[in-house]
Image (cartoon, rainbow, N blue to C red):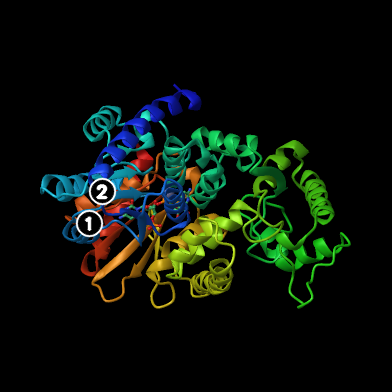
């Protein structure tokens, strides 16, 4: 069954049950709802959607943001929460057994709801149909997860998307939160269809937003705005242009010959975002012509990779940082990763004054620390190789809060071999553990690599009891300092097996 509308119908039945469960429980309780959500862009978008929906329903709530729902955090919640209804968003499924044990079976008072899109605990992959069905039956009505409806949580719906459907089930008016759900999905890099379109349930959310005039979809060039345009073109991993690729000086000359002023008033090379429509059109035509001559391929083939969809929020000020959902998700990530998650929640809930101004400042520091990390890795040759994986230690340059983002950027850059997964390893301050962030390119995910499964299997093989997992292309965990070599060797073995079977 591949029809997303049909799958949505099945999801809606359970959302209705979850809604009844929610209201039945909160009726008896006088305390506020406690939302726990994940620290990344999708998690903040998810928390903001829930916050806004509860606010509109006059239901008091508070939001706590966690870097991950680790075992230690679950124990803290179990000891602390006695009277609040809890909602876990953008995490909770990967830890559902743990939550069940600590919060239900121990006679704890607080009922809870999980609104998540990660592979449930102990589920290796989406084809584990029988076990998934079993979890679905056993955890209804308190867990909502896309895999129960044969929906891929890694590419078809984000945590914010699941929360959006819950919010819409509470009140149809929450349809206006659809752009925030798109921001969450972009943050989780789920726009992986042709020309970076959305697939599955995400495309239905886009339809909601488009139909009601909240967003507009335009075509744009597939280069990052985070780097000067010549670098963005030269280092693109998707668009290969013989003679220009890897050569920033030649690429700058190429752009200058188009008659486009490439420097801004401060003397820096402009980014894609700084170019107007006509200038972008010139760059686009020139690249199509260049590529069809040099590579002898049809312009239509080039366009497939060169032109991408951008999802713009019509209510935002044009060309502000929140106009493009991609930039919006970047700001949320920057808030989360610089210990300012509350700002991110406020912005996603609609604050365009204080929080937004502060967040813009943070974003600059965040960008700097990412760039510093990436150039350090490149210049100091920090990537270490095993036969089937590669890894790096963040040392004192790349801390835990950005190790995941740096790993994501590496796998999307031309700095490393994308045919092996990468594991970023950062020492957690004041703790004897390393935070691990694994990332794999779609090209090897398509060949069988599943990092969620790999991390869980490597933990078992290493006799470690940390919780871990995520999605096939992106997963994480924590590992005691003295077990890191063993853990990485086991990751190498598991990936070897995944590629062979
Ligand atoms: O917990 P959550 O699902 O929201 O996080 C997914 C994380 O994995 C995000 O930080 C996202 O950027 C990253 N990711 C990635 N490459 C993918 C899919 C997700 O780097 N293909
Ligand atoms: O932390 P990081 O960004 O590397 O996480 C990548 C993905 O793995 C995210 O979707 C995150 O929620 C998930 N993850 C998890 N359990 C962990 C650590 C990460 O499900 N213990
Ligand atoms: Zn997510």
- Residue 207, image x, y percentages: 60, 34
Where residue 418 appears, as percent x and y from the top left, is 50, 52
Q: Nearer the viewer, residue 327 or 384?
A: 327
* Residue that sits furthest to the left in the current view: 106
Q: Residue drawn at (39%, 46%), measured in percent from left and top?
A: 471
The quadrant in which residue 163 appears is: top left
Q: Nearer the viewer, residue 414 or 479?
A: 479
Question: For the residue with label 2, is its CB less than 8 Å from the closest atom of ligand 2?
Answer: yes
* Residue, disc 1: 74
Q: Which residue is mark 2?
A: 95
Q: Circle 1 — which element? A: helix
Relative to 157, say whether 346 is above or below: below
Residue 107 x, y percent position in the rendering: 10, 47
Horizontal side of 351 relative to 461 (left or right) equals: right
Q: Residue at x 36, y 31 (%)?
A: 16
Residue 121 seen by the camera: no
Residue under the point 50% across and 36% down: 172
Looking at the picture, tell me which residue is in the foreground, 281 or 461: 281
Image mark count: 2
- Specify few, some or many for label 2: CA neighbours under 10 Å numbering under 14, 14-19, or 20 or more: many
In the picture, the quarter occupied by the C terminus is: top left
Q: Quadrant of residue 382?
A: bottom left
Seen in the picture, residue 233 relative to 163 is either above or below; the reply is below
């Amino acid at each position: 069954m591949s029809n997303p509308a049909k799958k949505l119908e099945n999801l809606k039945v359970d959302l209705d049950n979850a809604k009844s469960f929610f209201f039945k429980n909160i009726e008896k309780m006088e305390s506020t709802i406690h939302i726990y959500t994940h620290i990344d862009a999708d998690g903040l978008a998810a928390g903001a959607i829930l916050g806004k929906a509860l606010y509109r329903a006059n239901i008091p709530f508070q939001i706590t943001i966690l870097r991950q729902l680790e075992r230690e955090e679950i124990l803290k919640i179990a000891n602390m929460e006695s009277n609040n209804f809890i909602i876990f968003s953008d995490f909770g499924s990967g830890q559902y057994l743990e939550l069940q044990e600590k919060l239900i079976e121990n006679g704890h008072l607080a009922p809870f709801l999980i609104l998540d899109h990660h592979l449930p605990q102990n589920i290796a992959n989406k084809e584990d149909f029988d076990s998934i069905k079993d979890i679905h039956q056993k955890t209804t009505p308190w867990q909502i997860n896309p895999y129960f409806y044969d929906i891929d949580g890694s590419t078809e719906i984000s945590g914010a998307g699941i929360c959006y459907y819950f919010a819409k089930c509470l009140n149809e008016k929450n349809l206006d939160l659809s752009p925030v759900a798109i921001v969450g999905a972009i943050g989780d890099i789920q726009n992986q269809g042709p020309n970076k379109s959305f697939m599955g349930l995400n495309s239905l959310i886009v339809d909601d937003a488009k139909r009601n005039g909240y967003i507009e979809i335009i075509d744009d060039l597939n280069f990052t705005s985070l780097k000067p345009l010549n670098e963005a073109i030269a280092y693109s991993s998707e668009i290969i242009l013989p003679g220009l690729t890897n050569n920033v000086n030649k690429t700058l000359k190429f752009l200058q010959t188009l008659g486009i002023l490439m420097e801004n008033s401060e003397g820096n090379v402009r980014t894609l975002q700084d170019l107007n429509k006509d200038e972008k059109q010139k760059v686009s035509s020139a690249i199509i012509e260049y590529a069809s001559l040099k590579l002898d391929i049809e312009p239509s083939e080039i366009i497939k990779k060169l032109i991408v969809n951008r999802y713009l929020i019509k209510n935002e000020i044009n060309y502000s940082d929140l106009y493009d959902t991609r930039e919006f998700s970047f700001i949320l990530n920057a808030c989360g990763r610089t210990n300012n998650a509350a700002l991110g929640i406020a912005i996603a809930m609609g604050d365009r004054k204080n929080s937004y101004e502060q967040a813009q400042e943070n974003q600059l520091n965040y960008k700097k620390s990412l760039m510093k990390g990436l150039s350090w890795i490149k210049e100091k040759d920090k990537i270490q190789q095993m036969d089937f994986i590669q890894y790096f230690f963040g040392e004192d340059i790349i801390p835990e809060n950005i190790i995941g983002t740096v790993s994501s950027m590496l796998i999307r850059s031309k700095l490393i071999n994308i045919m092996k997964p990468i594991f970023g390893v950062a020492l957690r301050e004041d703790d004897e553990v390393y935070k691990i962030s694994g990332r794999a390119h779609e090209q090897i995910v398509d060949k069988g690599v599943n990092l969620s499964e790999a991390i869980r299997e490597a933990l078992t093989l290493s006799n470690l009891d940390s919780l871990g997992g995520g999605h096939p292309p992106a997963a994480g965990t924590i590992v005691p300092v003295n077990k890191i070599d063993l853990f990485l060797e086991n990751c190498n073995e598991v990936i070897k097996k995944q590629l062979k079977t």
